[in-house]
Image: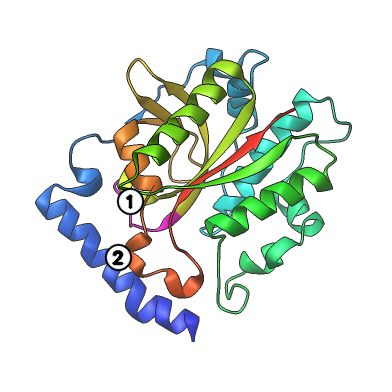
Amino acid sequence: MMNLFRISIVRPYLIIRYFFHWVTRTGSFGPGQASHITPSPGLSQGTDLQAALFRHHVKQYHESSCSVASVVCVVNVLRERYGCPGPTVIQQAILEKVRTAHWKERMEPGGYKGRRGLPLAVLAQVVQDSLRAYGIPFKRVEMVQGVPTQGRSRQQILGHLKNFQFLDNCLIIAHFDQGAFLKELNIPHISPVGGFDPSTGFVTILDVDSDQKLAYRIPFNRFYKGISTRYAGMFRPFGYERGGLVVIHLN
């Protein structure tokens, strides 16, 4: 039933919305578009978390596995930081090891009971259980839901971005409307945050989408809008409410 709903109602609606933004030059076709970053060896050099994210960045292995690529990335970053033994964790391996919320089944074509991908709250639980499964020390995993009209939420998210950039004491995975950032359909998407520049307000996204060959920067206002979306209400039957952040606080 869910698959039929997704095919017959959700996708046509998303396509119509995409063309509306294209014609009206709104959404990702409007001001504040993503700016792709020219590759540089310097981005992946260094001992800080930001450089490690560029080293361990991977692309999702199919259209709904953005959560897998994002979690594998941060797991390998932290395994490197803490000197955990063993080979680099790959996407298929983590799905076999971490069975939280039927994660592996959610990646299959039919999903788990018709549900594919991970809503924000489920992503937070999967991140926490993945760190525990691989014996990675951490202080806590925090879920921060974006709320469009609350200044307190904006300041909280700005604080996490600054801590990541300057204190090197956390990692951030964003759960966002991909069509708010890029000229793509307005669908839920997940990718790690790769940097923040408070002087310009630009947030770097290490997008795991295989169609996005390069990382990109977006203005904070657009970033906040993308993580505060309710996904037009079309994804509520699949468990999606709003976007937001999953913040891994380190010891």
User: For residue 80: magenta?
Assistant: no
Q: Is residue 55 left or right of residue 84?
A: left
Element type where label 2 sits in the image: helix
- Tag 2: Cα neighbours inside 10 Å, few (<14), some, or many (≥20)? some
List x then y, in percent, for residue 148: 32, 48
Q: Quadrant of the C terminus?
A: top right
Q: Is residue 235 left or right of residue 135?
A: left
List x then y, in percent, for residue 244: 47, 47
Q: Which residue is mark 2?
A: 14
Q: Is residue 119 left or right of residue 7?
A: right
Q: Is residue 200 left or right of residue 24?
A: right
- Tag 1: Cα neighbours inside 10 Å, few (<14), some, or many (≥20)? many
Comparing 229 with 20, the one in front is: 229
Colour mapping: rainbow
Vertical position of residue 59 compared to residue 157: above or below? below
Comparing 140 with 57, the one in front is: 140
Element type where label 1 sits in the image: helix
Label pair 1/2, CB-CB below 8 angstroms: yes
List x then y, in percent, for residue 158: 43, 30
Mostly what secondary structure, the magenta segment?
loop
Which residue range is magenta in the image?
182-188
Vertical position of residue 194 compared to residue 188: above or below? above
State how far apart marks 1 and 2 are (Cα). 10 Å
Instruction: State which tag comes first along the sequence, 1 or 2.
Output: 2
Residue in the picture at 32% in, 64% down: 232
Q: What amino acid type is highlighted by mark number 2?
A: Leu
Give the numbered dot on residue 29.
none
Q: Which residue is mark 1?
A: 179
